[in-house]
Image: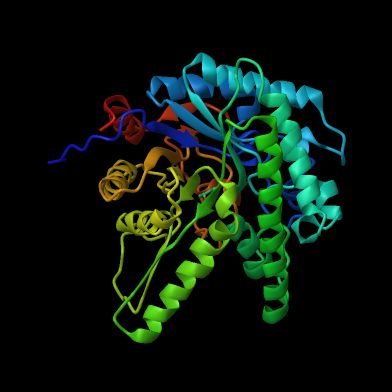
Amino acid sequence: MDQEFKFPAGFYWGSATSAYQVEGEVENNDWAEAARQGKVPPAGRACDHYNLYEKDFDIIKSLSQNAHRFSIEWARVEPEEGKFDEAEIEHYRKVLRALRERGIEPFVTLWHFTLPIWFVRKGGFESKKAPFYFSRYCEYVVKNLGQGSGIPKFWITINEPMVFANMGYLDGNWLPLKKWYYPLSLFRYLGVVKNMITSHNAAYVKIKAVNPAFQIGITTDNISFESSANPFNYLLAKFLIWFQNHRFLRKIYGRQDFIGLNYYFHKKFGDKKQYEKSDLGWDIYPKGIYNVLMELKRYHKPVYITENGIADAKDMKRAKFIKDHLYWIKRAIDDKIDVRGYFHWSLLDNFEWPWSSLPSSNFGLPDGFRPRFGLVEVDFKTMERRIRPSAYEYKKICETNS
Ligand code: FCB
């Protein structure tokens, strides 16, 4: 039988998406360009969320979620360097109003992996000028969306900088698809991380100048590293905790009001145990979320779980997955980590990035649409939505805050 645990009053319960993964018909960013060249799977119409957002927010409301995390597509808002598209800003104003009308608190991500083509031509985050371009874009959005009836309070500048740098420059499977020989790649990777730190810090200053009450952070994809007693494994885990989980957060220490934590992965060195897996072959290891939360104690900041989810097309594992992770989140709250919200990834089945673990079996869909992360199933031909049973289980949690 399930045990019941109460969450703190005012806890945010929601789900998350990102623009390129759900909106559809974004043609002027780096991923769309690479898809046209056959280098990555296309996102095409994705979930057509750009047009169907009101229906999707009705679903969120019907599921008793009181918050929603989504992202702005930089290439829509600034299609050419320094030229901003007012019509697109107006679109996102409507999105924000639609959330507010339904009593849903918006968490706005300013950048979630996809880049305008002009920015890439200028060197993207490899360029020393990246902080200037990035912070100018952030400032523009915040100035123009940070007024009026839909005004958001929570802003996320950068989604998972370490994943972006790692997948794009070391793994080389994601944009900008730049893998060199290892030592050279590593130098470029470190340069990109450094420029992203500076970009976040510059954006923080500019956003605070617009409104000091805005709450600003990044989302960080922290991995639960553990080891067997073997001293080499122990040191390796310690090093990686610092390198992957803390380095970026430490460099932006004074310039973050909260920490957005995304949790998907764990690694226990020297451990041969087999774990239950998602459709992507990722281990299911709920205790890991407790480990990575406890590592955040030293920052003394509020924490929001901005992503946590599972590719599970049959929806056999998702409800238990959510409950087991929430159990460990509650344990961390009891151990004095100030967790204030949980956003499940994702609201909808959507376009998924080309992880190397993408299974080769086919559900009759192009690569990017095989993993099914949604609380809500999407038929990519008809764009119909069907709420999965696990979403109703999650609804009970959102309703009772327990
Ligand atoms: C995270 C990304 C998100 C989604 C999930 C599965 O790393 O932020 O866009 O792809 O993984």
Q: Looking at the image, which residue is at 37% across and 23% down?
A: 64
Q: Quadrant of residue 195?
A: bottom right
**Residue 26 seen anywhere in this rendered image of the structure:** no
Q: Is residue 163 above or below residue 381?
A: below
Asked whether, in this view, residue 252 is left or right of residue 281, the answer is: right
Q: Residue furthest left?
A: 1
Asked whether, in this view, residue 397 is left or right of residue 200, the answer is: left
Q: Quadrant of residue 210?
A: top right
Q: Looking at the image, which residue is at 55% across and 40% down?
A: 350
Q: Is residue 319 above or below residue 285?
A: above
Q: Position of residue 191 (x, y in %)?
A: 72, 67
**Residue 19 seen anywhere in this rendered image of the structure:** yes
The one of 394 and 131 positioned closer to us in this rendering: 131
Q: How is the image coloured?
A: rainbow
The one of 396 and 301 positioned closer to us in this rendering: 301
Q: Quadrant of the C terminus?
A: top left
Q: Position of residue 277 (x, y in %)?
A: 36, 58
Q: Quadrant of the N terminus?
A: top left
Asked whether, in this view, residue 324 is left or right of residue 109, the answer is: left
Q: Looking at the image, which residue is at 63% across and 37% down?
A: 19
The one of 306 and 277 positioned closer to us in this rendering: 306
Q: Quadrant of residue 89?
A: top right
Asked whether, in this view, residue 338 is left or right of residue 197, the answer is: left
Q: Position of residue 261 (x, y in %)?
A: 46, 49
Report the number of discs: 0
Q: Position of residue 309 (x, y in %)?
A: 42, 46
